[in-house]
């Protein structure tokens, strides 16, 4: 028997197994995302608001985001209200808090206004990029928190 005739079916079987593994992983990710959607109230794409906004820094986001990528605050439905004052940020962990909060519950540091923090934080050294350790989504270098699950992002090596 020719060696190529024996090797070819093995290569085909390996390719099929690899493809099935990728498809299975994609289905698991989709099911996990569906579970997150169900936890968030079972919102379909039609039920999502047109825009979501951060109550801390007043940035606008796409409706698929749940958390602000700048300060990690949970987003609210609709555009930011001009009557709503911006919140405050912890200078240590950089997590945002709504108006009226005075201290970070994690670090016990006094919170600073968003504008003051942005003005005094200084430029960030631009790393290659960031990734969410929880869901695996990639983010821009200036993002600090994952918009999907609120986890603190880590720099990609």
Image (tube, rainbow, N blue to C red):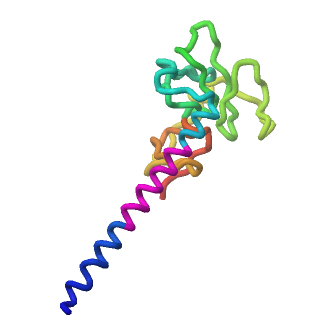
Give the quadrant of residue 53. Answer: top right
Is 33 covered by the magenta stretch? no
- Residue extending farthest to the front is 1
Q: Position of residue 117 (x, y in %)?
A: 62, 29
Position of residue 95 in the picture relative to residue 22 (left or right) = right
Residue in front for this viewpoint, 137 or 142: 137
Residue at 47 percent of width and 43 percent of height = 139
Q: Residue at x 22, y 90 (%)?
A: 3
In the figure, 8 relative to 1: above or below?
Answer: above
Examine the rendered structure and indicate whether residue 156 appears above or below residue 90.
Answer: below
Q: Residue 27: x, y in percent?
A: 47, 50
Q: Main secondary structure of the magenta part?
A: helix
Check the image and name the residue furthest to the top.
83
| Residue visible at 77% across and 30% down in the picture | 110
Q: Seen from this angle, which residue lies furthest bottom?
A: 1
Q: Image quadrant for the N terminus?
A: bottom left
Query: Does residue 115 show up?
Result: no
Q: Left or right: where does residue 50 sit relative to residue 37? A: left
- Residue 131 screen position, x and y as percent: 51, 49
Q: Is residue 25 magenta?
A: yes
Query: Between 114 and 54, which is closer to the camera in this rendering?
Result: 54
Kindly indicate the quadrant of the structure image that contains residue 5: bottom left
Residue 120: quadrant of the picture: top right
Q: Which residues are magenta?
A: 17-32
Q: How many marks?
A: 0
Residue 64 position within the rendered picture, expressed as x and y whole percent measured from the top left: 50, 30
Q: Is residue 55 above or below residue 94?
A: above
Query: Is there any visible trace of residue 141 in the rendered image?
Result: yes
């Amino acid at each position: 028997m020719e060696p190529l005739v024996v090797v070819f079916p093995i290569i085909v079987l390996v390719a099929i197994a690899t493809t099935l593994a990728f498809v299975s992983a994609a289905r698991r990710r989709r099911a996990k995302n569906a579970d997150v959607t169900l936890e968030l109230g079972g919102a379909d794409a039609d039920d999502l608001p047109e825009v979501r906004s951060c109550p801390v820094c007043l940035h606008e986001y796409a409706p698929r985001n749940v958390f602000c990528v700048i300060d990690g605050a949970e987003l609210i439905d609709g555009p930011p209200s001009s009557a709503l004052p911006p919140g405050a940020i912890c200078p240590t962990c950089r997590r945002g808090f709504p108006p009226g909060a005075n201290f970070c519950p994690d670090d016990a540091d006094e919170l600073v206004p968003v504008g003051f923090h942005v003005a005094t934080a200084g430029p960030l050294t631009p790393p290659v990029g960031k990734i969410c350790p929880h869901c695996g989504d990639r983010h821009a270098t200036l993002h600090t928190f994952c918009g999907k699950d609120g986890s603190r992002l880590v720099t990609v090596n």
